Every structure is written in C-alpha cells, then in structure tokens.
Amino acid sequence: MRMLRLFISAAIVGFTINLWADPYRRQVTLEWEPNPNANAYEIQIIDKLKPNKPISHFVRGSSWQGKLGLGNYVMKIRSLDQRKVPGEWSQVNEFTVTLEKVQIISPKMQEKIKSRSAEKAEVTLTWAQVSGAIHYQLRITKPDGSEVLNETTSDTLYKAELAVATAYHWEVQAASDSEIKSEEATGSDFILLGNKLENPEIKHPENKYAHSVQWRAPENAQAYDYALSKWDPKEKKWKILDRHFGAPEIEAILPAEWHGGKYKIAVRATAENREPSSVSVVSFELADGERTPAAEQQAAVRSSVDHSNGWFGFASYLVTDLDYSGVNSDRSPTGTPLNANVQGALGGTGRIGLGFLAPENNWGFLGIVDDSGMVINSTVVNYYSIEGNAIYRANVSQFAEIRQLMGWYFKHYPDLVPSASSYDNDFVAAMGPHYGIEYWQGLTRKFGLQGNAHLYYDAIQLSTPNGQSLQPSLSYQLGFLVSYRYSEQTTGLVGYAYRTDTANYFSNTGSLNTSAITGNYLNFILEWDL
C-alpha cells in the first residue's frame, strides 16, 4: 500500500487546527490526502511527554476531529482496505497544540492617540484573556525595528510611558505554564501624537523696506504653512499673493517687485505626529518704489526722528535751580515798590502729553499739561499750565524735518511778595497764543538731534491779585535734545532747555507789577506710540 500524504495548512505540519475555547484543551482537526483504495483509516497520536500511551482512532473519512491538551505531539496514519487489512504506516509528523492567538483591544490598528505632553505620555495597552495562558509576552518597537519595550506580564493590561510624536508597533503573545505559546504574536500599529505646538512669534518688519518676514520657531516645530496677502482697497478684501506648505525655513521672502501697500502674513507651525499650532497673523506695510539696501538705510536713519505715526503719548521732567525776580507796588507800606529776588531755588516741571501725527499727511495735534514747583525758604510754591497745538511737519532733507506748533495756552504764574519772615504768594492767570518750532535731524538708525524754540504771549487776562489789567508779555523757551529710539514704539530724549516765564500787570497806583522765573533745565522725555 502506498504512503499517505498529509495536507499542510496554516504553517502547521501536516494538518489544520481549528480552535474553540476550552480551559486546557482545544478542538483539533487533522486532515490528510485520501487514498482511493482505502475503506477506513487508523490514526495514531502520541503525546511526546507520554510516549508509551499512544491514542488510536479509526475513521471513515480523510480527517479526524477531537480535543487535545496543550503540548507537542507526533502522528502517523495507515489505511484499511475492505477486508480491514491495514497498510503501512505513514511517516511520523510532528505538530503542536498551541494557545489561541491574542485578540487586541486597544490601541487598534493605525489608531492615533492624542496627548498633551511635549516629551512623554502614558499609553494603556489592553488585550483579551486567552484560556490556558499564564502570562503574556509584550513587545513594542519603532518603525525602524528598534526595540522600545520587552516585558512579561500576567495581566491583560499594561501601561507604558512612551516618547510622543512617534509611531509604534506593538505585539503580544500568550504562554502557558509549560511555555506553550499561542500560534503567533498578534500585532498592531499606533501613533502617539505630541502636544499642540505653540504659535510662531512673528517679528514685525522694522520698516517699510523689508525684504522678508521672520518668525521665532516654537519648540518641536519642523515646518511651517504660511500665506502672504495684500489688501486691495478697491475690492476691500485681502488677496493671497504667495502660499507655502511644509516650508522648513523660518522666513518668508518679500519679492522686490511687490508694490507698496498693506500686507499681512499668516503662519502655522507643523511637525510630524504633533498637532499643528494655531495661526499667527501680523500686518505690515511696504514702501512704494525700490526697496534697496540704500533705501532701507535711508528709511532707518529717517525713522530715528520720524518716530510717531498715529496716536502717541509722552511724559517728561525738567529739573533745575530757578531764579525768581518780581516787583510789587500794591503792598508797600511806604509806597516804595517791594522787590523779590530769589536765587538758586530748587525747582522742576512734570509734563504729560497726548498727540496725533497722521501717517497719511503732515498735520497733527498735541495737548500738554505742566505741573511746576519750586522750594523757597522750605515752602513749596506750585504753578501749572495747559496748552493745545496743531502740528505741521515738513521735510527739509532725507534725514531731517521741521515741525511747527501753533495753538493756545493757559498759564498760572506765581507772584511773590516779600513779607516779614518770607514771601506771600499770589497768582496771575493768563492765556494767549503759542508758537513753537522744532528741528529734527536723524544721525543713525537709533540716534537723532532736536533743536526747539517756543514763544508764549500773554494776550488775555484771566485773573490778577488786585484785579487790575494784564500787561501783555512774552515768555520763551530754547533748547536742544538728543533722541534715542529704544524700539519701534518708544523713543527717549535728554537735553537742555533755557526758559523764561514772565507775567506783568498794573498796580493800583498805575505802575507795573512784574513776576519772572528763569531757569536752566535738564530735560528728560519718554515718548511712545499708542
């Protein structure tokens, strides 16, 4: 009788195994190639751990089904003819009854797991329990095959701390107490996403002659999506001129042929296996004409003095020793005018202001409030002023301009009269026109010079100590300042000013009462765009 041939299925030598859950035994199906002359078959199965206790079965067909415990076995088959005469035994075939394959619960295939971490996050791996399994072999690898984790556990849940923004393959295989394992490891792939990227910090172009816009790269960013748009004033909408996805640079080029106007850039940071950032947006302006290095340098020097476009505020303090002189004929007991002369009185003026210089034209305005004081014989004498001006500015060169200030002011003057112990203090209040002129000269990108002159004319009487008429008089200030531009929004100035404030009014006898304050001031100013 010829030898029987066995079917090979599912990588198990000579037979196919079908499984049903049973704590320690599994349903097994053994199949072989039928012999056309066979009336029946005898199959002998031997557990390798019990070689002296073979199990024999007689079957009509070319397969056998039954339950076997976990372990290693050998089998052989012979056919029986119609007379029940057996043929020769087939070759011995070995096979193993293994555990069932592990069924993965999570993470499932190609699952993306979100995290809020920038570096590491905990991932919970779970799978179904396998009957007969005592422990499980868990293995995690990266796409390049490098091993991240290889652990044995008796649980069906494992918490692994893994680096974020990485793809992983994980697999698990069950094993019995005799180290009989499941047919093969069951695997799955997942991606552990990193936290959301921070927004790119876009650097505003320093001037209208920029050739590029740059931004600061947030941590873990690998590439950037950005769009450059220009405002169309006719259609009143933004039009995209340039767009890039996945650009590795932290800079967007502004082509030289682009015309002047209002632009904006929108930038989003991206990275593999991380949530992209939100979009950062910055608007800026480009100048008409050439944006060459020479033009840029010219604009940079010019910006050291042309530092205010739109609303701006400033605060200053002038400090000095003051000289006061005055003549008063109303309070003299003898009829002889009383003279007040104070030399080197400590004094100062605090000033705050709010102004506007229109970007589109040369006009603007400026409002100022002064609060001044001086110390005389341990007594503090305070006085103040308010002024409002229109501003007109005109260029006189590439790096210089003249600003003219025209408006009205109100002043509150001290009027000191000698007394037995010190001075009595009254006040004169007047208002009138003011005219000022300032020359601004840019030196470098940061430094500039300013020279100024201001005239104040007391034209309108508001109050005098005796109620008599005001005699119009002229007050003035001369000075110069050095400016330093700290940033695009902030400029500091320091310098010298000589100032005289004079008030005259008639006495009750018809003579003239006078009050004059002169000082050499050290001037500090801080100006900032709003």
Image: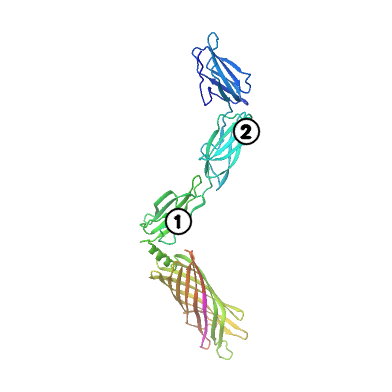
Q: Tell me which residue sits at (49%, 13%) in the image.
A: 36
Q: Where residue 257 sits in the image (x, y, percent)?
A: 35, 57
Which region is colored magenta?
A: 510-522
Q: Tell me which residue sits at (55%, 79%) in the image.
A: 321
Q: Which residue, given by chain and number where applicable, does mark 1 sit on?
A: 214
Q: Where residue 502 sits in the image (x, y, percent)?
A: 50, 81
Of marks 1 and 2, which one's residue comes earlier in the chain?
A: 2
- Determine whether the residue tagged by mark 1 lies in a helix, strand or loop: strand
- Determine whether the residue tagged by mark 2 lies in a helix, strand or loop: strand
Whether 427 is among the magenta residues is no
Instruction: Identify which amino acid the numbered label 2 is placed on.
Output: His
Q: Residues within 10 Å of mark 2 (few under 14, many from 20)?
A: many
Res. 443 image quadrant: bottom left
In the image, residue 354 above or below residue 126: below
Q: CA distance from mark 1 to mark 2?
A: 56 Å
In the image, residue 266 above or below residue 38: below
- What numbered label is drawn on residue 135? 2
